[in-house]
Amino acid sequence: MKKIVGMWTAILFVVWGLVGCSLDSGTSTNSTEKKEEGDVKIGLSISTLNNPFFVTLKEGAEKAAKEANVSLTVVDAQNDPAKQTSDIEDLIQQGVDIILINPTDSSAVTSAIESANEANIPVITVDRSADGGDVVAHIASDNVAGGKMAGEFMIETLKDGGNIVELEGIPGSSAARERGEGFHQVIDKASNIKVVAKQAADFDRAKGLSVMENILQSHKDVKAVFAHNDEMALGALEALEAHGMKDVIVVGFDATDDAVKAVQEGKMAATIAQKPELIGENAVKTALKVVKGETVEKFIPVPLELVK
């Protein structure tokens, strides 16, 4: 009988030891302490790869990841907040060490960031900020300053004033809010300029075209258009050309290749140049610093310039 009791005691000790080891390993799954650079796994959730700007941002991140010899997993939310939440949950399950997020919707992404927080996975936002959750750093151009830059250019160019149209980005995105805020801080002070129509076209070229066509049905006397990104600006340009309105000043935002070409050809008046490749590169470099336990700035700005 004593032999049987002793045997069961030994078995219990072995089982307890295995359970203890299992629990210990579980708590360290997402630990980024003492990580070798080559072992680091970075997740990148992009709002949409249907926009050339974000394709360039992704390429900048991939370039930096390759140079650092780290793993980078990129997922495309396709401008769907629900898909982005699901994508981020998948990255968490894959056990990435840090997640870079370019939010489709700054508010809707909060729950996904909080899930990463609970899993002890650091989060960095890129280009667009988040309204909630714990974010260690935000890497972007100063969208408010860019909006002001566009407003100042428009006032300078429209010396005799006139009616203007504003095409807004995705409602709820920080980029749309901030670019519009900066623009209105300047343009609302001009007594001879009036925003006669302001409507969302979701940062999309096709929507920019259709929204602009609808606006032109009731507003024929338009002197200028400010679009929160180049895709909408190029869509608006198509609508204006279809109506034979070639003298309307069109200002975009991002300085994509198509927009810069349109400026050079005299079709668009200007675009605010961001540097998406640099945003992507800085995001990965900052992520590596965070993984190594280094302190990083809460906001890491990327410079802007006016292309005209």
Image (spheres, helix red, strand yellow):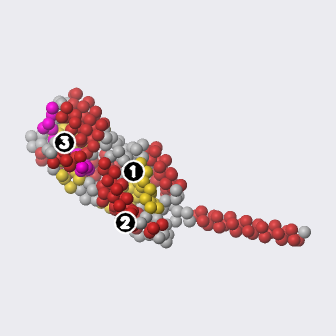
Q: Which mark is residue 22?
A: none
At 44% from the left and 69% from the top, the residue drawn is 37
**For this view, does 124 lie left or right of residue 164?**
right
Residue 143 percent coordinates (x, y): 28, 52
Q: Is any atom of residue 197 visible in this view?
A: no
Identity, as a three-letter code, of the amino acid under mark 2: Glu
Would you place residue 169 above or below residue 274 in this image? above
Which of 156/126 is in front?
126
Q: CA distance from mark 2 to mark 3?
A: 39 Å
Mark 1: amino acid:
Ile
Query: Which residue is situated farthest in the left direction here?
Result: 160
Near mark 2 (Cα within 10 A), the count class, few <14, some 14-19 or many ≥20, is few
In this rendering, the answer to whether 12 lies above or below 201 is: below
Q: Secondary structure at mark 3?
A: strand
Which residue position holds label 1? 46
Of the pair 151 and 246, the residue shown nearer to us: 246
Q: Which residues are magenta?
A: 244-257
Report how far apart the C-alphas of labels 1 and 2 lie in the structure: 21 Å
